[in-house]
Image (cartoon, grey):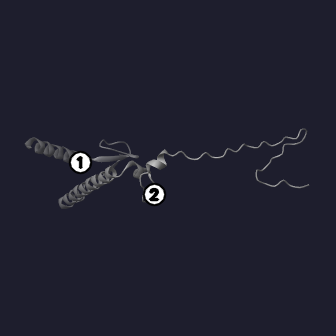
Amino acid sequence: MKQVALLMLLSAAAFGAQAQQPVYRCGQTYTHQPCPDGRLIDSSDPRSSAQRAEAKRAMAKEKQLAARLEREREEREAAGSASQAMSLGSNASAPSATAASAPAPPRPRVKPRKAKAASGTDFVVVVPGAKPARK
């Protein structure tokens, strides 16, 4: 436990030292090294320590809420059956065994009609279901 606390303290000190380095804006990029025509950017955190602590508490609370909501969602998904998960209806139920095993009645087969081509004439377009024009 002491090693974890020491590691956290050292990492916080390293991040604090890194945040104190100057930041330069060079065009559309940011760097810690000065560049030609680069501008020095104020990278200090204007928040107080109380504000930073409050933000950390809020973040921890949101993480706990997210974890709880994820557990609840996983429990709901586990409780539901596969047919309910794939259904688009609001009150889906599993299909009965007789309906699943009975084959669907065959659909009547309709043969497509071919248009009769008149030899020696232009191509004529026939619209299905339309009545032919009388001459």
Dot 1 or dot 2, earlier in sequence: 1
Mark 1 → mark 2, Cα distance in angstroms: 54 Å
| Mark 1: few/some/many CA within 10 Å (<14, 14-19, 20+) | few
On the image, the x and y values in percent for residue 76 come to 32, 54
Q: Secondary structure at mark 2?
A: loop
On the image, the x and y values in percent for residue 33 come to 30, 41
Identify the residue at image location x=83%, y=42%: 116
Location of the N terminus by quadrant is: top left
| Circle nearer the viewer, 1 or 2 | 2
Location of the C terminus by quadrant is: bottom right
On the image, the x and y values in percent for residue 82 come to 39, 48
Identify the residue at image location x=91%, y=38%: 120
Q: Which residue is mark 1?
A: 19
Identify the residue at image location x=58%, y=47%: 105
Q: Between residues 44 and 93, which one lies in front from this camera angle? A: 93
Quadrant housing residue 113: top right
Q: Is residue 1 left or right of residue 120?
A: left
Q: Is residue 12 left or right of residue 103?
A: left
Q: Amino acid at mark 1?
A: Ala
Q: Which residue is mark 2?
A: 89
- Number of callouts: 2
Q: Secondary structure at mark 1?
A: helix
Q: Is residue 61 left or right of residue 24?
A: left
Q: Between residues 118 and 50, which one lies in front from this camera angle? A: 118
Q: Could you say which disc has been placed on residue 70 in the image?
A: none
Q: Between residues 18 and 36, which one lies in front from this camera angle? A: 18
From the viewer's perspective, is residue 125 above or below residue 50? above
